[in-house]
């Protein structure tokens, strides 16, 4: 086969056969197809999409580009959660220890930062010593020993997504339902799960900005999971403002630790983060048969924070993956950024909106994400929000604080971050954070 012919076929809106897709993926993984041709193919997919059957085949081939892990010898119903990507979305860091502390094993293969959104792997790697590249035997021994494990794609597990994900990140080919579905579901199906909870983000900071597209993505993901014999449910949740109060890798670890310790997350800027976390954990506990309903699961999830078992579980996971748990108990020991700067407003009123897409992009300019494949992440870089949507402000109030080592990023970031806050004279209408629940049988509005 000739790569350019397959690119042309997709560019013209054609449907690739299983053999054509297999050849393309295998050649790309082995280096026979260069990045520039795969970029062109991905852009053609972005504009032309894939049929339902093509998406299923693409997912299956991505999955079989590497090994699949068998966890049947590990007791319990193994349940994972995956988000389609958001700004300030550190839910996995809090939820994996909660669910494992409640007795449901959580095998998790996560991604790096993608587009303007952060990635769980980059957040975890900001913890000194934490290893996300475990071998399959190490992965199995961590989940057996502590009940949760969080790793990235390796050359053994979904190598096609490892390469393609990094390429999509820097070629503006992320926001495409079949590519997202293939990327997420190949990782999830490879990791040895029995059931899956998906958090499909919608709104300004999400890859799918409209509710209808988010619903289409949620239904596609649920259909693929169910088609592969895994019980799969999805929530559609709002990304109209960043989740919680931090954006940036170590900053998000700090917020997660404070939420797990119960010192944040109730009646403060992290409340939205914990609302989403508890509902997703509750659904995982229901699928893992530790709770009869999502509401019962939410109660167990809250209790694991109150009694300290969830935070202790995080320390165990970190130690088992080579990280230094004392770094999480002594957060003040972490290296400081070269610059920390406040962003203030001169206006009076209420925060009507916070543009999470703009803040996601700003965090990349500060060093918290990648603009090119080879870019190194600065774990200290990022943004801390002092105000969230609905808060009242006076002239002179701080809206956010940001940190960076980059001298040249300071002024542009200050302007960009300030412009991301929309201030209005009247309090904004409260919008729901969790919009819908999608399962095999249909879609329900979430109360
Ligand atoms: N998360 C993934 O793992 N892949 C995507 O394509 C988007 C979000």
Image (cartoon, helix red, strand yellow):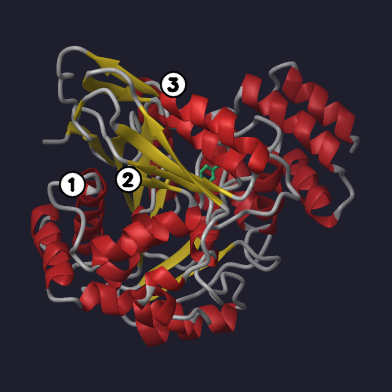
> Can you tell which mark lies on residue 245?
2
Q: Which tag, 3 or 2, sits closer to the chain's start?
A: 2
* Image location of residue 284, percent across then percent down: 26, 59
Q: Is mark 2 on a helix, strand or loop?
A: loop
Q: Residue at x 35, y 69 (%)?
A: 78
Front residue of 376/93: it is 376
State the separation of the CA atoms marked 3 and 2: 17 Å
Answer with left or right where residue 35 lies relative to residue 350. Answer: right
Vertical placement of 361 versus 89: above or below? above
* Residue contact between numbered discs 2 and 1, judged by CB atoms under 8 Å: yes
Q: For the residues marked 2 and 1, what is the alpha-carbon distance in whole angstroms?
A: 9 Å
- Name the residue beneath numbered marker 3: 419
Q: In this view, does 35 lie above or below 228?
A: above
Task: Work out whether mark 2 precedes mark 1 in sequence or the reverse, and give the earlier one.
Answer: 2
Give the Cα separation between the discs numbered 3 and 1: 23 Å
Query: What residue is drawn where x is 73% and y is 42%?
Result: 372
Picture coordinates of residue 4 (x, y %)?
88, 29
> As rendered, which of 78 and 246 lies closer to the eye?
246
Residue tagged by mark 1? 268
Disc 1 on helix, strand or loop? Answer: loop
Disc 2 under 8 Å from ligand 1? The reply is: no
N-term mark: 3 or 1: 1
Tally of numbered tags? 3
SS at mark 3 in the image:
helix
**Taking 183 as reference, is 227 left or right?**
left
Q: Tell me the crowding category of disc 3: few under 14, some 14 to 19, or many 20 or more residues within 10 angstroms, Cα based.
A: some
Q: In this view, does 211 lie to the left or right of 113?
A: left
- Looking at this view, name the residue that lies furthest to the front: 396
């Amino acid at each position: 086969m000739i790569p350019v012919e397959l690119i042309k076929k997709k560019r013209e809106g054609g449907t690739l056969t299983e053999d054509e897709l297999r050849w393309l993926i295998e050649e790309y993984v082995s280096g026979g197809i260069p990045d520039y041709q795969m970029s062109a193919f991905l852009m053609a997919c972005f504009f032309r999409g894939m049929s339902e059957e093509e998406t299923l085949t693409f997912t299956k081939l991505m999955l079989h580009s590497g090994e699949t892990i068998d966890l049947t010898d590990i007791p319990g119903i193994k349940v994972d959660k995956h988000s389609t990507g958001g700004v300030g979305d550190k839910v996995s860091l809090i939820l994996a220890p909660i669910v494992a502390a409640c007795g449901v094993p959580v095998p998790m293969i996560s991604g790096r930062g993608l587009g303007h959104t952060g990635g769980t792997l980059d957040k975890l790697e900001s913890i000194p010593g934490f290893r996300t590249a475990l071998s399959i035997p190490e992965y199995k021994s961590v989940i057996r020993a502590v009940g949760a494990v969080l790793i990235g794609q390796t050359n053994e597990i979904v190598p096609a997504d490892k390469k393609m994900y990094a390429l999509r990140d820097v070629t503006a080919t992320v926001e495409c339902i079949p590519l997202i579905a293939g990327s997420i579901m190949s990782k999830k199906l490879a990791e040895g799960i029995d059931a899956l909870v998906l958090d499909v983000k919608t709104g300004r900071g999400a890859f799918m900005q409209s509710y209808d597209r988010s619903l289409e993505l949620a239904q596609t993901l649920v259909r693929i999971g169910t088609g592969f014999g895994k019980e799969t449910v999805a929530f559609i949740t709002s990304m109209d403002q960043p989740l919680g109060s931090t954006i940036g890798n170590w900053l998000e670890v700090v917020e997660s630790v404070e939420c797990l310790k119960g010192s944040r997350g109730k009646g403060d800027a992290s409340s939205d983060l914990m609302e989403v976390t508890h509902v997703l954990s509750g659904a995982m506990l229901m699928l893992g048969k530790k709770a009869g309903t999502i509401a019962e699961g939410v109660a167990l999830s809250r209790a694991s924070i109150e009694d300290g078992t969830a935070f202790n579980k995080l320390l165990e996971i970190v130690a088992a993956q080579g990280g230094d748990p004392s770094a999480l108990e002594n957060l003040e020991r972490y290296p400081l950024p070269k610059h920390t700067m406040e962003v203030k407003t001169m206006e009076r009123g209420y925060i009507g909106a916070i543009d999470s897409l703009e803040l996601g992009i700003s965090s990349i300019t500060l060093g918290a994400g990648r603009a090119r494949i080879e870019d190194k992440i600065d774990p200290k870089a990022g943004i801390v929000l002092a105000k969230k949507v609905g808060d009242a402000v006076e002239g002179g109030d701080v809206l956010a604080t940001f940190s960076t080592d980059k001298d040249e990023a300071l002024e542009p970031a200050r302007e960009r971050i300030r412009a991301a806050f929309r201030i209005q004279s009247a309090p904004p209408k409260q919008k729901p954070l969790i919009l819908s629940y999608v399962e095999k049988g249909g879609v329900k509005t979430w109360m």
